Image: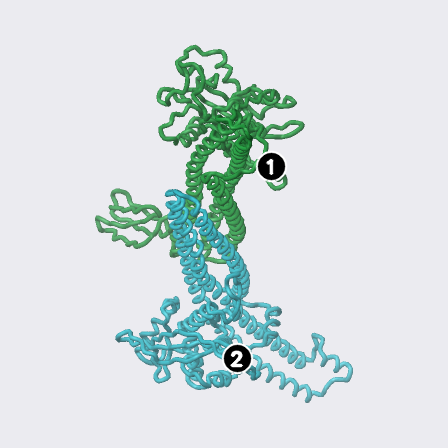
Chain colours: A green, B cyan
């Protein structure tokens, strides 16, 4: 029962990517997709969805009108997801543009959800709505209810300790936005979940709250019946593969937890290291003020340490914002997966119990009663769904972690490269020999000599370049051709006269 | 720089007592062409010092020969101390080799064992007899500025090793100093194991040392010290303060850096455990974990190298004290001079008053005269005569003190200039080597993480 072909008009339906104009092509949404040439009034209305879609309690106004996301960033995000081998994509969802809303009752953030699709399930090719975390939470619950045999992706953590974390800080909001974006993209990628009714409404409805209030639970048959599975059945024997999955998830969650703790510890140590560095660098400055010849070298070292400190701060910020949240997400993911496994066990247990009950009954019917058959169906569907989802999950997990860990390595490499550059750039400064600094006297084309006496060397990165003097020849004023070299920090200049 | 007439006595016989303040500014070039030639090589820039060479007089002739000094070993010993109690101490083997000019080969000429307290004795002696020289400092007696992984134990082998290097450095600094290298006690320190202590003590240098109290008093009361010395004193105070601060913070930085690296080692273990449950990801994780282990263990060598940098800074921290000592000596001499001048002036005035019979200032004599009656002309004559003698003596003394003072200032300042050059050179070298260490650390970091990234990419 995993998503059959969508019901719809034969003329429409998922188009191959090549046929379809690119979702971002032209800002004119008057261009209908799939051959419709006349823009419908609905289409025009879609454009102004941005603000009207916001149903804010107490008539609060949005912080500002949202502008379409820049094409390139949207494109980048789309391309990142476009990894499925040859699979045609007909649904693109993005989360961006967080905005703060201040009302009398509460303050909260909404995010803009942009949907582009050619699917029949969507009346319009493009939608733009605003949603808040609550709405995502609602969606997830609905998905769990309606698709209990599937693995639903996790949401970022709901509760934050108000004192510790600033819910409205840029970093927190951005981290959350990324997680919410990932959440929707994972659903979008799922062949079954992406066709879920609730998902559709979430992406498209002008007034989500009204829909929520209606409580329209469009549960599939499977969903309804599974919901009513009562616990209390004891499982006889778990099929090996599900036992293996269970064990795997246990260990996996454990290891992830350890990695999370290690990563946190590293960041903590790095921050403490940073604190000391920030005191260390300036001491060289203080020293520099006492000295004559050593003043510049010492000042250079001080600046260098300052640069390294900045690089370290960037590293810790990045790790905190990008690395830790993804880890945590996966831990939540595996937790929710475990509960799906449990449900599967329940379904199997119910089936086995019913089967046993039938076997015990004296009536020897040749045919198995209908409700036991239904149970069996349920179980087999569940197993199939779960298996498929697990495979998909494993492959996504592999990719996600490859990306995550490579990202971690990358950031560390960048940190060291920044430090390396800083230290390498002061070596010339440290090696500089103090000599009388006189301005060079250049000759013009007629003269055949030049007295070169400047020996200023090195230079701080970003400051005016200075010359590095190695050998210099006092030039004979009579010689016709005089060659001498001046090496700047970047290139060699030869002067011929 | 001009030098006082050669004072060979100090150098070649057990030193006879000499009045303090007699600046033995060193010998003129000793006899011999060899000496002339080598004298040009007497370094002021520390290069020879870096090479482990020194210039010394040999006992047999006045020629200067190139020698190599090394403190090659350290040994734990037990013995009885002054209070006849068992104690454990470390002895250091000092080997002296003379370098033959012709083939550059070195021949071991002397080797003996010395302990730290004997080095201290040598230095204290040098401080007394060369007050105008910035005497090189000894390595620290006790381990300070340690970060938690470093041991503060004096018997710890790493500490002993670093101290060995420090002591060698001290000897090389002395041996490469144009004046100190010619000192006989120093020479005996390197060559005469037994009885050296007695020889040093026989010089009676302890008696000649200025009392701390006297010096302190002079520092407060001196009216007209040479401005350069006052500035130098401020500089050395501030230098001491800033380097201490630097060393303290550096130790904390080292501590933290250690923590960062070591925690990464945990990744190694957990990646390994995780890889056990993975199929395709397993290999990549496992090998990445190995790189994390490499990363974590690399910090030990890095920080060990950095200790060398800290030691270089420490030397100049202690040098600040030596600078101050020279300033103190100047203040003492200047104060002495001022007191002598003051004394002379008052005596002159007294004399004048007696001669003219006028009492211009309040004096005890004036009071008693008023109370008990005038003295007889004979008495007065006698007193005037005594005073005149004293005045004469005083003037002589003042002259010589003045001369001494000026000589001291001249010679001391010359050595201070030499020291400044040395300091600038050495500290620049230290900063360069520190930067090089940091560069190497960064490159290692890039290497490890690049390797890890490659492993991750294969996951």
Name the residue at the right extreme.
Answer: B371
Rendered view: B146 above or below A281: below
Residue occupying the point 31% across, 76% down: B106
Q: Which residue is mark 2?
A: B20
Residue A242: percent from left, percent from top = 47, 38
- Which residue is rendered at x = 40% and y = 74% of the image? B72
**Of the residues tagged 2 and 1, which is closer to the observer?**
1
Crowding at dot 1, Cα within 10 Å, few <14 / some 14-19 / many 20+, comes out as few
Residue lying at 47% horizontally and 62% vertically, measured from the top left: B310
Q: Residue at 38% across / 77% down in the picture?
A: B95
Element assignment for label 2: loop
Pointer 2 indicates a residue of which chain? Answer: B
Instruction: Classify residue B409 as left or right of residue B172.
Output: right
Give the answer, above or below, for where B44 lies relative to A171: below
Give the spatial CA distance, label 2 vs label 1.
81 Å
How many numbered badges does the structure rendering display? 2
Q: Are marks 2 and 1 in contact (CB under 8 Å)?
A: no
Residue farthest toward the bottom in the current orientation of the protein: B378
Residue A38 bears which disc, if any? Answer: none
To which chain does the residue with label 1 belong? Answer: A
- How far across and how far down the image is residue B305, in percent? 43, 61
x, y (%) of residue A91? 44, 24
Looking at the picture, how far across and down is residue A21, in whole percent?
38, 20
Position of residue A60 in the picture relative to residue A457 (left or right): right
Using the image as rendered, state which of residue B364 and residue A289 is in the foreground: A289
Front position in the image: A13 or B21 = A13
- Does the rendering let one see residue A317? no
Badge 2, how many Cα within 10 Å: few under 14, some, many 20+? few
Q: Tell me the element at label 1.
A: loop
Residue A159: give its label.
1
């Amino acid at each position: 029962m995993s998503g059959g072909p969508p019901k719809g008009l034969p003329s429409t339906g998922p188009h191959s990517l090549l046929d379809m104009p690119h979702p971002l092509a032209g800002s004119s949404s008057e261009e209908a997709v799939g051959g419709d040439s006349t823009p419908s009034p609905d289409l025009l209305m879609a454009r102004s969805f941005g603000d009207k879609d916001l149903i804010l309690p107490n008539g609060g106004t949005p912080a500002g009108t949202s502008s379409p996301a820049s094409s390139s960033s949207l494109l980048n995000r789309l391309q990142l997801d476009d990894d499925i081998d040859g699979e045609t994509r007909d649904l693109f969802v993005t989360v961006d543009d967080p905005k703060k809303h201040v009302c009398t009752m509460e303050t909260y953030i909404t995010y803009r959800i942009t949907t582009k699709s050619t699917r029949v399930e969507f009346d319009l090719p493009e939608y733009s709505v605003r949603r808040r975390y609550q709405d995502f939470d609602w969606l997830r619950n609905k998905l769990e209810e309606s698709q209990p045999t599937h693995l639903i992706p996790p949401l970022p953590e709901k509760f934050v300790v108000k004192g510790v974390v600033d819910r409205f800080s840029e970093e927190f909001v951005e981290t959350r936005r990324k997680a919410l974006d990932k959440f929707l993209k994972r659903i979008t990628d799922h062949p079954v979940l992406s066709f879920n009714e609730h998902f559709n409404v979430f992406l498209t409805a002008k007034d989500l709250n009204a829909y929520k209030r209606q409580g329209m639970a469009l549960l599939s048959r499977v969903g309804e019946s599974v919901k009513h599975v009562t616990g209390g059945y004891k499982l006889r024997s778990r099929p090996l593969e599900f036992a293996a999955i269970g064990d795997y998830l246990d260990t996996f969650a454990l290891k992830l937890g350890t990695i999370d703790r290690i990563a946190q510890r590293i960041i903590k140590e790095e921050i403490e290291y940073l604190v000391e560095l920030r005191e260390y660098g300036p001491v060289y400055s203080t020293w520099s003020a006492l000295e004559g010849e050593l003043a510049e070298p010492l000042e250079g070292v001080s600046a260098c340490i300052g640069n390294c400190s900045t690089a370290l701060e960037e590293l810790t910020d990045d790790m905190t914002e990008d690395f830790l949240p993804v880890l945590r997400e996966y831990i939540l993911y595996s937790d929710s997966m475990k509960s799906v496994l449990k449900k599967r066990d329940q379904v199997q247990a119910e089936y086995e119990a019913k089967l046993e009950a039938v076997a015990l009954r004296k009536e020897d019917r040749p045919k198995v009663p209908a409700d036991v058959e239904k149970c069996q169906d349920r179980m087999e569907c569940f197993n199939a769904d779960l298996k498929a989802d697990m495979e998909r999950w494993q492959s996504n997990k592999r990719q996600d972690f490859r990306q995550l860990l490579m990202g971690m390595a990358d950031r560390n490499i960048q940190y060291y490269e920044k430090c390396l550059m800083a230290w390498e750039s002061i070596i010339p400064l440290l090696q500089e020999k103090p000599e009388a600094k006189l301005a060079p006297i250049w000759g013009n084309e007629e003269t055949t000599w030049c007295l070169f006496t400047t020996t200023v060397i090195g230079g701080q990165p970003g400051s005016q370049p200075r010359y590095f003097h190695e050998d210099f020849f006092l030039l004979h004023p009579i010689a016709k051709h005089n060659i001498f070299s001046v090496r700047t920090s970047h290139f060699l200049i030869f002067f011929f006269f | 720089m001009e030098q006082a007439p050669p004072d060979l006595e100090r150098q070649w016989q057990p030193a006879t007592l000499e009045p303090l303040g007699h600046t033995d500014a060193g010998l003129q070039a000793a006899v011999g062409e060899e000496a002339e030639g080598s004298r040009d090589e007497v370094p002021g820039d520390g290069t020879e010092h870096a090479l482990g060479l020194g210039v010394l007089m040999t006992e047999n002739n006045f020629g200067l020969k190139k020698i190599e000094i090394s403190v090659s070993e350290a040994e734990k010993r037990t013995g009885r101390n002054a209070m006849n109690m068992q104690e454990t101490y470390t002895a250091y083997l000092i080997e002296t080799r003379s370098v033959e000019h012709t083939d550059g080969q070195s021949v071991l000429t002397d080797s003996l064992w010395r302990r730290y307290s004997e080095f201290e004795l040598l230095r204290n002696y040098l401080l007394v007899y060369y007050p105008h020289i910035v005497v090189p400092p000894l390595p620290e007696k006790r381990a300070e500025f340690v970060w938690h992984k470093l041991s503060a134990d004096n018997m710890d082998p790493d500490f002993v090793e670093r101290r060995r290097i420090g002591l060698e450095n001290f000897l090389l600094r002395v041996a490469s100093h144009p004046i100190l290298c010619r000192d006989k006690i120093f020479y005996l320190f390197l060559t005469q194991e037994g009885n050296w202590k007695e020889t040093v003590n026989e010089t009676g240098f302890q008696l000649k040392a200025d009392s701390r109290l006297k010096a302190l008093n002079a520092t407060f009361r001196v009216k007209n010290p040479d401005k350069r010395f006052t500035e130098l004193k401020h500089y050395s105070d501030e230098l001491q303060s800033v380097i201490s601060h630097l060393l303290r913070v550096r130790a904390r930085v080292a501590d933290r850096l250690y923590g960062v690296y070591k925690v990464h080692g945990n990744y190694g273990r957990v990646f390994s455990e995780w890889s056990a449950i993975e199929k395709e990801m397993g290999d990549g994780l496992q090998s990445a974990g190995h790189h994390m282990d490499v990363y974590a263990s690399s910090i030990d060598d890095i920080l060990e190298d950095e200790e060398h940098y800290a030691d270089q800074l420490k030397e100049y921290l202690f040098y600040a004290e030596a600078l101050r000592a020279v300033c103190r000596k100047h203040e003492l001499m200047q104060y002495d001079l001022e007191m002598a001048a003051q004394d002379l002036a008052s005596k002159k005035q007294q004399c004048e008053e007696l001669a003219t019979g006028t009492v211009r200032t309040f004096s005890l004599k004036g009071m008693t005269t008023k109370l008990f009656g005038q003295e007889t002309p004979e008495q007065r004559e006698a007193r005037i005569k005594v005073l005149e003698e004293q005045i004469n003596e005083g003037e002589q003394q003042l002259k010589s003190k003045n001369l001494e003072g000026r000589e001291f200032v001249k010679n001391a300042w010359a050595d201070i200039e030499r020291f400044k050059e040395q300091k600038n050179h050495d500290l620049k070298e230290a900063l360069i080597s520190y930067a090089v260490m940091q560069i190497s650390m960064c490159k290692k970091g890039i290497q490890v993480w690049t390797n890890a990234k490659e492993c991750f990419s294969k996951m």
